[in-house]
Image: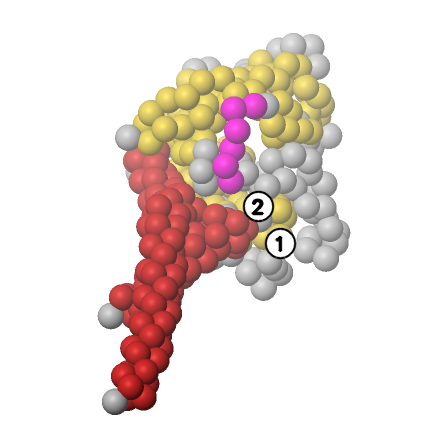
Amino acid sequence: MRKGFGIGLSVLGGFLLMLAVLAQFWAPGQLMKTPLDTDSTTLLEGTAELGGSDDGELPVRAFSVTHADSERSDDEVVVFQNSSCLVKDEGGIDSCVSADDPDERLLSASTDDFATDRRTAEAVNDATYLPPSAEEKEGLVNKWPFEAEKKSYDYWDGLSGQPVQAVYDRTETVDGVDLYVYSVSISEAPIELTAGVPGLYNDEKELWIEPTTGSIVNQIDAQERLDEDGNPFLALDLRFTEEQVAKNAEAAKDNADKLRLVTETVPLIGYAVGIPALLIGIALLLLSRRRDQSSDVESAHAGRHTGLSLKKS
C-alpha cells in the first residue's frame, strides 16, 4: 500500500511540476498576444470650437471602429482597419454620418490601415500585411504591450505623423482596476489642417492603461490646431464616455484575471503542491524499497535457520 501511495504521489507531483513550468514559461508566449477577432467601437465625447465661427463651443462625439483582419494576420502580426469620425452631438447621434448628412453634423472622417506586433503592440511596416497606400508608423499603435512597465514609450500620433513620448505619470484605480497613466505632450507640431493647408498642432493627452493586458481603458485629449499665423483653427477636448470607460475596465479586468490565473496562480499552486508531493512520493518509494529488501533478508535468514535445524535432526 505504501508503494502504491508513493507512486501516486510521485506521478501527481511530477504532473503538477510540469504544469507549473509550462504555465510559467510557455503559456505567456502563447496567451499574451493581441486577439485576431478584435472588433470594437470606441465612443468619445467632448467639445469643439471652430476658428472663425460664431457658434462657440459645440458638443461633439467621436466614433472609432477598429476591426482585425484575421485573413491577413498571422501568429506574430495582427492587421487592423480603422475608421473614425468627429460629429456634432445633435439629434441623438449614435454613429458616424455621411458627408452628405442633411444636418451637416460631420466635422471630419478618416480611415487607416495598420499592423502591429501581437506581443509588443509596436507598428509593423511590411507590404506582406499592408497595402501600398498605408502610412508608415513607429512606436505603439492601438494599445500598450502586455506587462506594460512604468516607463516612457514611443507612441504613434496619427495627426502629426510621428512617434511621441508617452511618459509614465502615476497609477490610478478605476472601477477597481489598477491602471498606469501615461501623458503625451505635443507642442507646435507641423500638420495639414485640410488638404494643402499647413498649420500647427498642440496636444495634451492622458491614457489609462491596464498593465497586464496593455489595453487602453480611458483617454483624455485636449487639442489645439492653429494656422501658420497662430490663429485658432480648431480647439478640441475629447474623452471616453463614462459607459465606455466602465466597459473597458470590466473587459480589461476579466482578461487580466484570466492571464494571471494561468501565468501566476497555476505555477504557484503547481510548485507549492507538486514539489512536496513528489518528494513525499519518492520518500515513500524508497522506504517501501528498503522494507522489501529487509523482508527479503529476513526470509533468507529464516530459510538458512530452517535448513540448519533439519540437518541437526
Q: Is 148 inside the magenta-drawn segment?
A: yes
Q: Quadrant of the C terminus?
A: bottom left
Q: Find residue 287 and report its horizontal and vertical position in percent.
A: 34, 61
Residues tagged 2 and 1 counted as in contact (Cβ below 8 A): yes
Regarding mark 1 in the picture, which secondary structure is present there? loop
- Residue 119's tag is 2
Name the one closer to the observer, 182 or 95.
Answer: 182
Whether residue 218 is visible to the viewer of this picture, yes or no, is: yes
Name the one closer to the observer, 233 or 117.
Answer: 117
Name the one closer to the observer, 134 or 129.
Answer: 129
Regarding mark 2 in the picture, which secondary structure is present there? loop
Question: Quarter of the image holding residue 179?
Answer: top left
Please tell me how crowded label 1 is: few (under 14), some (14-19), or many (20+) other residues with Cα within 10 Å: few
Mark before the other along the chain sequence, 2 or 1 = 1
Q: Main secondary structure of the magenta part?
A: loop
Whether residue 35 is visible to the viewer of this picture, yes or no, is: no
Q: Is residue 246 above or below residue 119?
A: above
Instruction: Answer with left or right where residue 300 lies relative to residue 70.
Output: left
Question: Quarter of the image holding residue 96?
Answer: top left
Residue under label 1: 76
Q: Find residue 167 and report its horizontal and vertical position in percent.
A: 56, 20
Give the residues drawn in magenta, as a range: 146-151
Name the one closer to the observer, 13 or 249.
Answer: 13
- Residue 146's tag is none
Q: Amino acid at mark 1?
A: Glu
